Image (cartoon, rainbow, N blue to C red):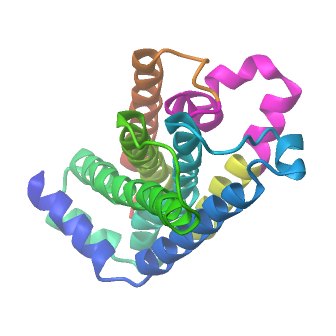
Amino acid sequence: MIRLIRAELLKVRTTRLWVGLLIGSLLLNGAGAVLLLVLAGTAEGRDAGLTPVRTSEDVRTIVHTGAQAFLFVLVLAATMATTEYRYSTAAGTYLATPRREGVVTAKSLAALPVGAVFGLLSGALALLVVVVWFAVKGGGPTLGAPVWIAVAEDGLQCAYAGVLGAALGIALRSQVVAILVVLGWTLVVEPLATSLVPSLLPWAPFAGAASAFGSANAELYSRPAAAGLMLAYAACAWIVALVLERRRDV
């Protein structure tokens, strides 16, 4: 299994897609952190619920913008699987590893560290923006343990997104369809459904389960319950991908 995971990670490293997505993720999260700091405490910011950044909890809220990297992780993880079918390399992969559960598991597990790196870097960048901001302006809140935990939580949420993205790519096979489904679900379907039917929010894979490790919806679950639900979603996604993959030819 370790050999298979290394092979999947090598496939990711030898493409330029991950570089572009990582740069895009960092730019988006860095700009978001700057915008929050600019608006915090202003009249416009107060209307949006943004208070001046004075405590570790305020910094923690900004750091949690790094979790938005999960969108880029979903796209990258989905392509880790769909690229095999787009360029007809899946046959060679399965000839080298005839047991399909091994390939499906390896792709899912390889997406874990990829997602974690995206989340950790994005969270760390948001924290760096805060540090530089207050270094220039003077003063600033104390960076306690909750801030560093927030960076780790960004990594956790993005690692979770990596597993779901890889499983989705295996299940759908088509790169275009997988990317459209990923973006459509996270940007349209899930926000709209949870807005129209608030009772669905705790069961939403990202707005509910994953965001329990952020600041917005931390009240939805205890951390163990949220982690359990995330594991359940990841396991179900892996099972669906494996069942579909076993039924189809390459």
Residue 48 lies left or right of residue 12; in this view the side is right
* Position above or below: 170 against 238: below
Q: Is residue 213 above or below residue 226?
A: below
Q: Residue furthest front?
A: 138
Residue in front for this viewpoint, 204 or 25: 25
Magenta stretch, main secondary structure class: helix
Q: Is residue 84 left or right of residue 31?
A: left
Q: Residue at point 61% right, 18% down? A: 220
The magenta region covers 188-216
On the image, the x and y values in percent for residue 136 come to 54, 69
Give 40 or 160, whichever is nearer the viewer: 40
Which image quarter: residue 230?
A: top left
Report if residue 173 is visible in the image: no
**Foreground: 55 or 114?**
55
Write down the quadrant of residue 72 in the picture: bottom right
Q: Is residue 205 magenta?
A: yes
Percent coordinates x, y for residue 198 in the rendering: 80, 21
Residue drawn where x is 45% and y is 46% of the image? 154
Quadrant in the picture for the C terminus: bottom left
Near-viewer residue (72 or 142) = 142
